[in-house]
Image (cartoon, rainbow, N blue to C red):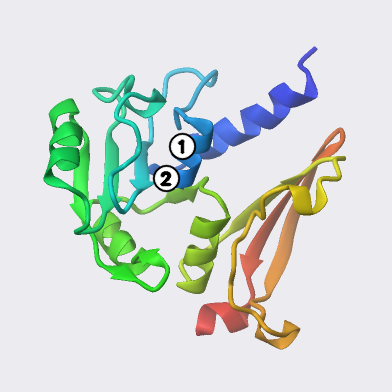
Amino acid sequence: SRGLGDVYKRQVHNMRRKHDAIMVGSGTVLSDDPSLNVRDLGACIQPYRIVLNSNLDIPVKSNLTKKLHEQPVWIFHSNKASEERKNKWLEIGADLFECQVDNFGISIKDVMQNLSDNGITRLLCEGGGKLAASLIRSEMVDEIVTFHGGLTIGADGLPSIGNLGVCSLSEAKRWRLDRTLSFGAEVLNIWHPTDKYTEN
């Protein structure tokens, strides 16, 4: 029988399979060295891999670049990235996009416009809390999927969503719980914006 971890991983890969691209920030690349591909679900079209990295300082030798010819990597950076770093990534076949910068880093709106212009319509964000917060602040999120298990981490862990600048509950964006799936001790919740969020 399949273990609980296998069921959880299968759900993640099934989500990846349904999207045109997977997006992460540089922190996720540096800490996890992810492949960002679909595995163990048979033959499928692999999603594009999108990375936000202002200075292009993520390592060129990583899991992202092992199968670049099969699964493209697009890196969004600022004008602070050096020509040397740009050339290294271009030489191995990555696509680079220079973006504007706002108070929180690379402009999410600029990134989304570039993705839309290049045919990406279904984007899965697997980035950390900073990237998640940027997407929510920019009102670019159609759905939030959360996985919960029977673990207590507390303040020792990293937040799944970074600083949103919320000072009171009345300022918080509200979400509607539409679906819950259980896999033993693991619970998957699917949330959608309320009407108030989508009308802003």
In the image, which disc is placed on residue 30? 1
Residue 44 x %, y %? 41, 25
Q: The disc labelled 1 sits on which kind of residue?
A: Leu
In the image, which disc is placed on residue 48? none
Q: The disc labelled 2 sits on which kind of residue?
A: Ser
Residue at image location 28% in from the left, 33% down from the top: 72
- Tell whether label 2 touches label 1 (CB within 8 Å): yes
- Relative vertical location of residue 168 with respect to residue 126 in this rendering, above or below: below
51 to the left or right of 38: left
CA separation in Å, label 1 and label 2? 6 Å
- Relative vertical location of residue 39 with respect to residue 114 in this rendering, above or below: above
Query: Could you tell me which secondary element the residue under label 2 belongs to?
Result: helix
172 to the left or right of 109: right
Query: Could you tell me which secondary element the residue under label 1 belongs to?
Result: helix
73 to the left or right of 41: left
**Label 1 packing within 10 angstroms: few (<14), some (14-19), many (20+):** few
72 to the left or right of 49: left
Quadrant of the rendered image containing residue 173: bottom right
**In this orientation, which residue lies closer to the viewer: 43 or 31?**
31
**In this orientation, which residue lies closer to the viewer: 58 or 39?**
58
**In this orientation, which residue lies closer to the viewer: 171 or 31?**
31
| Residue wearing tag 2 | 26
Residue at image location 42% in from the left, 19% down from the top: 43
Residue at image location 86% in from the left, 45% down from the top: 152
Report the quarter where the N terminus lies: top right
